Image (spheres, helix red, strand yellow):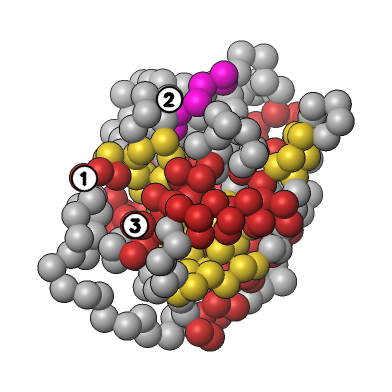
Amino acid sequence: MRIALILTGGTICSKADADGARRSDVGNALTLLEQHYRSAHPYSSVEFTVKTPLNKLSEDLMPEDWCKLLRTVAALSEDMPDGIIIAHGTDTLEQTAAMLSAALFGIPVPVLLVSAIAPLDDPQTNGHANFEAAVRLICRHLEPGVWAVFENSDGCMYLHRGFELEPCRHESYSFFSKGMQPVSDVQNPPEKKAACTKWQAAGLYTDIIPEVLRIEPYNGLCYDRFDLTGLSAVVHGTYHSETANASLYSPYGMHSLLVRCQENGIPCFLAPCSEAVQQYGSGYDLVQAGAIPLEGMPLHTAFGFVWAVCMQGYSGEKTAVRVRQIYQSLKSRCFRCCI
């Protein structure tokens, strides 16, 4: 098996300095990962190709870093491996997982995000276990697409679909998703998967770095404070009832934002929000005023999808069409661990 290992940084690639603060160190992480894996699996025939496009804690990632990561994956299409493992920090793992799910839609191999609760040289780390589980899943011919694998504090290793991954809660050591399944449930497929065909990754070779504004609603949010210059899109969240402030003629009402977006040709998405029926008048009024509803999509997922689609050159109404198309296609697939 040929696996591409992409190191980006994060806790799994970090090392504590003299003051105890963790700093990203992908070189040290690579040594520790390889040594630990080879010592635990001395007869493994897995061949790793290592790429290190980034060396950052995930909270420090910027839009251009996502572009670097995508170009690194795109370059693999010339000689596609059997699977790809991306070492990433936990703080924004769900955001990158959502973005990759949209940007790599149609990739013919599994892409697994792995992270850790502590550096690899810490006895408490689950980084080695997560990495080894990712390798094992690829060797068992995991279904193509974007996934995350993580050992929770209950000691169970879980597999998540990337677009469903939820943020790790504050001071938590566990990840959750709607369809999460224990890795122990993964079974070997009856037949070996056919060799991978060349993947058309032209959409990832781009100089476009979209600027997408993500807004989390709260009481007292003043929309006049936002500068919309140069924006590709706005992704606005909702409260639990799929609502936001719909007050008219007020800088605290989302209407004022929608008017400015329309004047500047900027699509403004509302997520999550039903496409057909809004339960409350506030949600209904915002959709009628031009907010584009994204049904069933948590804010971080909607942001990742919209960013990825804008990066691929979509704009205006075509952005919404493509975002919904990808999301609905991913949702319609049954959660199958192996093909």
Q: CA distance from mark 2 to mark 3?
A: 21 Å
In the image, is residue 138 part of the stretch drawn in magenta?
Answer: no
Residue at the outermost right position? 18
Residue at the image point whose x is 57% and y is 20% from the top: 170
Quarter of the figure with the N terminus: bottom left
User: Residue 153, labelled with which disc?
Assistant: 2
Mark toward the start of the polypeptide (2 vs 3): 3
Mark toward the start of the polypeptide (1 vs 3): 3
Residue at the image point whose x is 47% and y is 22% from the top: 239
Q: Amino acid at mark 2?
A: Ser
Would you name the residue on which mark 3 appears? 137
User: Residue 185, labelled with which disc?
Assistant: 1
Q: Nearer the viewer, residue 191 or 264?
A: 191
Residue range (magenta): 170-175
- Residue 262: % across, % down: 62, 48
SS assignment at label 3: helix
Q: Nearer the viewer, residue 20 or 144?
A: 20
Q: Amino acid at mark 3?
A: Leu
- Residue 24: % across, % down: 75, 45
Q: Is residue 3 left or right of residue 56?
A: left
Q: Amino acid at mark 1?
A: Asp
Q: CA distance from mark 1 to mark 3?
A: 11 Å
- Residue 274 visible from this viewpoint: no
Residue at the image point whose x is 57% and y is 31% from the top: 123
User: Residue 53, labelled with which disc?
Assistant: none
